[in-house]
Image (tube, rainbow, N blue to C red):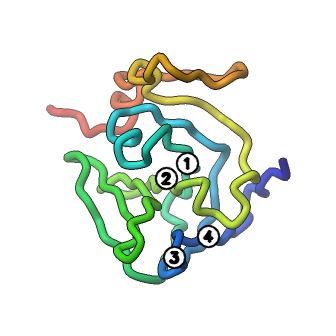
Amino acid sequence: MVEAKEDARLAGRCLCGAVTFTATPQGGMHACHCESCRRISGGVSLSVNCGDSLEVSGPVATYASSEWAERQFCSTCGAGLFWRLKAGGMTMVSVQAFDDPGAFAFEDEIYIDSKPANYDFAGDRPRLTGAEIEAMYAPSED
């Protein structure tokens, strides 16, 4: 594994190539086990936070997957590419959409309490519950 440099601008694309992008990843790869990620990706979602650095070209469609976040995909081939906070500041980009998906260290697992029992990732890393993640990112209801 060759880790991406902290300030490196990396390129990627969807399956058909109609959507291309560049972004500057912040940190390592996250594995999300939430039901939405599993249903949209067909498995665990592996992504990296690129903040607001994402620059996209091509036919991107948006799906509001919750009150506070949305998902984006290629409207030509359907490849799931991005998850972002509606308020901005965080855009999670599918690691598999980058030209070099092996460039990212495995940082943590989130929504661990939603993970099905039929798989586990080896290794020691932080594993956060859905409640812990939502306390950090979901808007408060006050």
* Identity, as a three-letter code, of the amino acid under mark 1: Ser
Q: Residue furthest right?
A: 2
Q: Position of residue 22 (x, y in %)?
A: 60, 73
Q: Are marks 1 and 2 in contact (CB under 8 Å)?
A: yes
* Identity, as a three-letter code, of the amino acid under mark 3: Cys
* Identity, as a three-letter code, of the amino acid under mark 2: Met
Q: Are marks 2 and 3 in contact (CB under 8 Å)?
A: no
Q: Quadrant of residue 13?
A: bottom right
Instruction: Classify residue 139 as left or right of residue 41.
Output: left
Q: Residue at x 43, y 59 (%)?
A: 80
SS at mark 3 in the image: loop
Crowdedness of circle 4 by 10 Å Cα count: few (<14), some, many (20+)? many
Q: Earlier in the sequence, mark 1 or mark 3?
A: 3
**Residue indicated by mark 4:** 12
Q: Position of residue 30 (x, y in %)?
A: 57, 39
The residue closer to the viewer here, 81 or 128, is: 81
Q: Earlier in the sequence, mark 2 or mark 3?
A: 3
Q: Quadrant of residue 86?
A: bottom left
- Separation (CA) of disc 4 from disc 2: 13 Å
**Residue indicated by mark 1:** 47
**Residue indicated by mark 2:** 92
- Separation (CA) of disc 4 from disc 1: 13 Å
Q: Residue at x 49, y 23 (%)?
A: 128
> Which numbered tag is attached to residue 16?
3
